[in-house]
Image: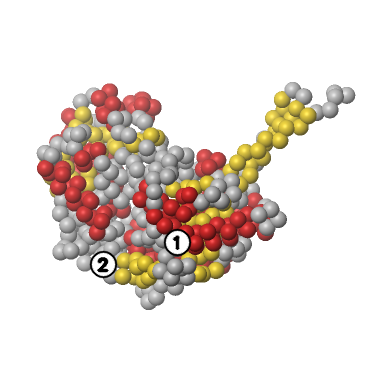
Amino acid sequence: MAQNGTTENGVAAGISALPFPQPVKIQEIRHTKIFINNEWYTSSKGRTFPTFNPATGVKICDVEEADKEDVDKAVEAAKAAKHRGSPWRRMDGSSRGRLLHKLADLMERDRILLATLETLDTGKPFLQSFFIDLDGSIKTLRYYAGWADKIHGKSLPVGDFVCLTKHEPVGICGAIIPWNFPLLMFMWKIAPALSCGNTVVIKPAEQTPLTALHVGSLIKEVGFPPGVVNIVPGFGPTAGAAIASHMDIDKVAFTGSTEDTGPSNMETKQRPKSQSMELANGISLAVEETQKGAFYNQGQCCTAASRVFVEESIYEEFVRSSIENAKKIVTGDPLDPQTSHGPQIDRQQFDKIMDLIESGKKEGAKLEYGGTSVGEGSLFIQPTIFSGVKDHMRIAKEEIFGPVQCILSFKSQKEVIERANSSQYGLVSAVFTASMDRALSMSAALETGTVWINCYNALHAQTPFGGYKMSGNGRELGEYALAEYSEVKAVTIKLSETM
């Protein structure tokens, strides 16, 4: 049953009213074991852990828990698969690309099943899983499938020498992914790694392992050689720490918090603080786009538009419009096509968000809308809007990772640039204005890895994604990601005497 608002046409905002795909009824989860060397294994310690449906609190199934010994076994399989002379190492780029395309084909075939699993495990609305997460995952695979036979070096004449450069795989890539976009993050990691010819040991988040394990079955069905992709579901302090510290793993790709890797022994972080700025133009567009940024995926996005700076001359109108827009958001069963807002991932995240909401009220921000849970004992939180927010408040400084929009005011462009850049994070920002000169000058001044102009959350497989400062090292997606998964070798040849 949908609650707390309906859209004008009775469907979730932003989704076409065409006939909807329907989630499948899953009687039993087929893949719950550790995936190593194209085979399924039980935990070396004989342990399992439960995964829950956050919308109902009901246990979905138990999953085998990987530990250090299981990670060691996975690394050995990955090492054998990347050894010189192995089928994977001998395979040319065109053949690697064909395998990635075949994997995308099987994901198209199982799209409804994968979207249903993603919704059950994360609580995100089914139509978002189907149209956004699955679409992005498949496009990412196809994008890097196209790159697989186009990764090559250069010829550099230097005096009496010719230097040839070669791009070679890094080797074994460890990957640790978060719970907010499990399938999409899985593809962001494995697609460029496999395109470059690497092997992978990947740990999905313990809250959301199910789609990764199903993809393991598809990897085997496609015909990837054994050991090329190994999936080790488990916890940060055990499986995550084993990947992060393993001496035979050549690269670690990590998105999440340091809790996901055990001890704080990794430099790569994705702990962003995002902001958007509305500059006296196009209020309705800015309201709609910034609320997509704030409330999409229940605010559980590294790109969440948690701070919105609005020029003083339109501040009151912007707040009023934001409240009216938030009232249209449909909260309810994530499997219901009308739902556009689901639960938070778990009780820990729920409690953290509610604590920050309380801090906003105590520190003097005005709660304009929401701020409460929906239903007794549930993990649903109403979309929440604060006005009168000041830079020193916790809700303006800390990453909320929940459906909370903080609206701040500013007087001048210089002032807002300084305030936006004062954060130790710098993943994304957005500017809404009719003046392209103003937009471009602000994009040059903002210290973030991505600047969106008159849009938000415009992510594409072709476009690099990553942050400044404490919001991460390196780039995902686009051609730029290939550099993260390859080594450049220079071969210099002395030319003979000129004839």
- Residue on which disc 2 sits: 57
Q: Nearer the viewer, residue 258 or 161?
A: 258
10 Å crowding of disc 2: few (<14), some (14-19), many (20+): some
Residue drawn at (16%, 43%) of the image = 360
Mark 1 and mark 2: span between their CA atoms? 26 Å
Where residue 52 sits in the image (x, y, percent)?
31, 66
Residue drawn at (43%, 54%) of the image = 240
Where residue 437 sits in the image (x, y, percent)?
36, 25
Position of 172 with respect to 378 (left or right) is right
Q: Nearer the viewer, residue 249 or 118?
A: 249
Residue drawn at (39%, 51%) of the image = 262
Question: Is 210 located above or below residue 292 in the figure?
Answer: below
Where residue 341 sits in the image (x, y, percent)?
26, 57
**Residue 300 can be seen, yes or no:** yes
The residue under label 1 is which amino acid type? Asp
Which residue, as the protein is rendered here, is positioned at the far bottom?
27
Question: In the picture, which quadrant includes the C terminus?
Answer: top right
The residue under label 2 is which amino acid type? Gly
Q: Are marks 1 and 2 in contact (CB under 8 Å)?
A: no
Position of 159 with respect to 453 (left or right) is right
Q: The residue tagged with tag 1: helix, strand or loop?
A: loop
Q: Earlier in the sequence, mark 1 or mark 2?
A: 2
Determine which quarter of the picture holds residue 111: bottom left
